Structure formats: structure tokens, C-alpha cells
Amino acid sequence: MGIIEKIKEIEAEMARTQKNKATEYHLGQLKAKIAKLRTQLLEPPKGSSGAGDGFEVTKFGHGRVALIGFPSVGKSTLLTMLTGTHSEAASYEFTTLTCIPGIIHYNDTKIQLLDLPGIIEGASEGKGRGRQVIAVSKSSDIVLMVLDASKSEGHRQILTRELEAVGLRLNKRPPQIYFKKKKTGGISFNSTLTLTHIDEKLCYQILHEYKIHNAEVLFREDATVDDLIDVIEGNRKYMKCIYVYNKIDVIGIDDVDKLARQPNSVVISCNLKAAQFSCAVKCILLHALDACFPHTPLNFDRLLAKVWEAMGLVRVYTKPQGQQPDFSDPVVLSADRGGCSVEDFCNHIHRNLIKDVKYVLVWGISARHYPQHCGLSHVLQDEDVVQIVKKKEKDDGGGRGRFKSHSTAPARISDREKKAPLKT
Ligand SMILES: Nc1nc2c(ncn2[C@@H]2O[C@H](COP(=O)(O)OP(=O)(O)OP(=O)(O)O)[C@@H](O)[C@H]2O)c(=O)[nH]1
Ligand SMILES: [K+]
Ligand SMILES: [Mg+2]
């Protein structure tokens, strides 16, 4: 029997089993069995270099965003409009057969956007190009789940299930469970609060299923069996996901309103410019819009702002001693990938720089006063300005200038200030 058949059989057994106190141990064990089989399924077939075979494109820019969705929801149309890179779009399904990269230029950064073939139910088990598509989406920093606003709400759940089946966790944080395998000593089970979904016996049983007999487990939240399995498997990827409802030009105002109010969601139309849209719809959208740009496709500005927020990129501008900061070319850091400390910043510029650094001067929202003398562990924030003071060098932090120490309230440096000359 193949792995997929085994999974199907266990799923059928779970569906047959009534959920009650007497069966909960058995059900927990079955869940662990399925998780183990799914992990086996993810192992690349012999002779291939990985599940993303033939789909890999070189990483480029400051971050990567994948477009995931059913066929013909408008992924390629969206890629073409956001990046200017042409990706064939047509009214028939599976128009796109491979991975097509484009670049979004936003806030002085470059974000790689990947168009992918449509996926269908069963993708996680290898239907269509599901496994390759999922492997590529795992390599990205965030996922845009593109949905057809005129189709069933169930599509979002089906896609979420497919992604969960391969270990992706969307808009969730890792379970607060400390877990460490040991060589001896048996299982030590502890919790900092009352657990309502799992008890010691169930925990032992799941560990037993994984043939783990010595370990330390500490629950720091009221976690579930699924959470425990995620922690034991240890290969889950926690990603932000934005639900992009496209084609709102073909649905009614009430439905647009409902979709626009869901968490992590944005409603758009590739077909209509904002100016062509009725005033009523624009009013509804305004609760989510900072400004309405009449000549951009409807709500693209909002979509880009959401992508930017989810990426969590931190732009740091360098200021050579005695000169204006260079506001054209930021060093781009990320808390999730590589970190945002002064040390990370220095390593970004040059890997040997760190040994020459005496301290740095920081202007911007991470600084308590302007400029703040900071060490290597100081955590920078978006739009900070940094001057590196090397050993045997004097800083110019005491001079007269815009970002000087007598400024009291740390404020984000505005675009206007960036353009204005900075005297030092
Ligand atoms: N009404 C409407 N149609 C749209 C919109 N965006 C895209 N379309 C149409 O939807 C159809 C499918 O678009 P594609 O961009 O090919 O969709 P896809 O998701 O890339 O499809 P596959 O590559 O086959 O998975 C095309 O006929 C587009 O013109 C929209 O906002 N409104
Ligand atoms: K299509
Ligand atoms: Mg396409």
C-alpha cells in the first residue's frame, strides 16, 4: 500500500470513530500516524534534487512572495500588473505551467513576486503540480492566497488544508511548548497552566508513537494534540498569508464589504481602475483605504501596503561622516531573516567591518534621543539613519544638524526630511 492510501485509510478510520473521552487517546495516536506519513510524503523522490524540481528560480531582491490559488483566479494577471513582467493570462484553467518571477519595486526595496500554476484539491498528495508549487511557496517569505471573490468561500479552507498538510502554518505562531529529547531519564511532563485538550497519558502516547521514551515536555499554553505533533515533527513553517479576493468587479457591494472586513484580507480588481468604480463601492472600501488613487487598479495600493507590512522589512540609511545620509539606497534588514541589530547591519555592508567598529550613531525611531550612541546589539527600526564610527575616528554627532541630540521626541524621518539637505 502506498503512503497516500495509508493516509486515506487512517482518515477514514478517524471519520468512523466517535469523538469522546474514551476514544481521545486512540484519535491522538491516529493523528500522529498521519503526521508521520505526511512527513514521509514530503521527502523528495530518489534521484531528484528536491520537491521543487524544475520550478526553482533564483532568489532575488529583499524578499520573496508567492501567489497561490486555484486555476484562473487571476494570479498571472496580478503578476503582470504588479511587476510589469508578462505572464500569460487566459480564461482557461492551467494557463501557467511553471514558476514565473517578477519584481515589485516598493519603498526603495525590491520584492520578488512568483506566479505559479493553479493548484487543486489534493495538491499536497501530488495532484497536478501541487507538490512543486507548494515547495516553491515554502521557499518564500509570505504567501498571497489569491481567491476568486465570486466563488465559494470554501476555496479558502480547501487551500489552507492543502498547505497545512505539507507543514505550512498560516498566520499562526509556533505553539508555546518546550520540547527536548533526552538520552535517559524517561519523560518529564509539566505545564504552567491547566490543560484542557491534552493530559499526561495522551502526551505519553503520542511520544510513544514517535518512539520517544526520554524527553522533557513543558506546556506554556493550553495547546492541542495537533500543536504537540507540530512541535515533535519540528519541520513546520510559520508564514504570514494575505487573502487576496480578486474580481470584485463581478460581485455585489454587500459581498465586497463582507470580504473586505475579514482579517488578513484585501479585496481587489485587476479589471477595473478605481475611477471606474461606483462611488458606493469606493465608500465601502474607504474604511480600508488610506487614499484612493483613481488611475491604479482597484485597491492595489492597499494590497501593496499589506504586503509591505507582512514582510516586516527594515530600511536603514547610511550616513557617512560629515555628509548627508544616502536616502537612495537603504540597507534592507528583516527581523525574521537575519535580524535587525547594528551587528547585522554592519555585516550586511561588509563581513570584515565589524572588527573596526567602535560604536554607531543612530537617528530615527529606534533611538531614544538624536543621535544615540549604540553598540552592536542595538535593534534598528525601519527608516533609521546610521553613522558608523570606526576605531581611531571621531563622530560628527555633536555638530549642528537636523537630527541632533537636542531633538526630544524620536520621530520617524519623513520623506520631506529625506529630501531636505542635512547640515552636518
Ligand atoms: N472580471 C475579472 N476578470 C479577471 C480579473 N483578473 C483576471 N481576470 C480574468 O480571469 C481569467 C484568468 O486569469 P489568469 O491571470 O490567467 O488566472 P491564473 O490564476 O493565472 O490562472 P492559471 O494560470 O490557469 O492558474 C482571465 O480571463 C483574466 O482576464 C478581475 O479582476 N476581474
Ligand atoms: K487561466
Ligand atoms: Mg496563471
Image (tube, grey):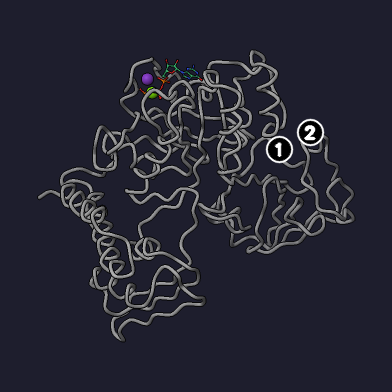
Horizontal side, residue 370 vs residue 386: left or right: right
Q: Does label 1 point to a residue whose CB lies under 8 Å from ligand 1?
A: no
**Looking at the image, which residue sits at the far left?**
1
- SS for tag 2? helix
Image: 102 above or below 359: above
Horizontal side, residue 334 vs residue 420: left or right: left
Please report the residue visible at 45 percent of the width from the left and 70 percent of the height from the top: 196
- SS for tag 1? loop
User: x%, y% of residue 34?
Assistant: 25, 56
User: x%, y% of residue 6?
Assistant: 16, 52
Please report the residue visible at 70 percent of the width from the left and 45 percent of the height from the top: 383
Tag of residue 419 = 2
User: x%, y% of residue 5?
Assistant: 16, 48
Please report the residue visible at 39 percent of the width from the left and 72 percent of the height from the top: 179
**Looking at the image, which residue sits at the far bottom?**
185
Alpha carbon separation for disc pair 2 and 1 = 8 Å
**CB under 8 Å between callouts 2 and 1?**
yes
Horizontal side, residue 80 vs residue 165: left or right: right
Residue nearer the viewer, 210 or 369: 210
User: Is disc 2 surrounded by few (<14), some (14 to 19) or many (20+) residues within 10 Å?
Assistant: few
**Looking at the image, which residue sits at the far top?**
276
Q: List the residue tagged with mark 1.
A: 327
User: x%, y% of residue 79?
Assistant: 47, 25
**Mark 2: amino acid:** Lys
Question: If you read the primary sequence from the N terminus, does the residue marked by circle 2 or circle 1 appear first?
Answer: 1
User: Is disc 1 surrounded by few (<14), some (14 to 19) or many (20+) residues within 10 Å?
Assistant: some
Residue nearer the viewer, 241 or 360: 241
Tag of residue 277 = none
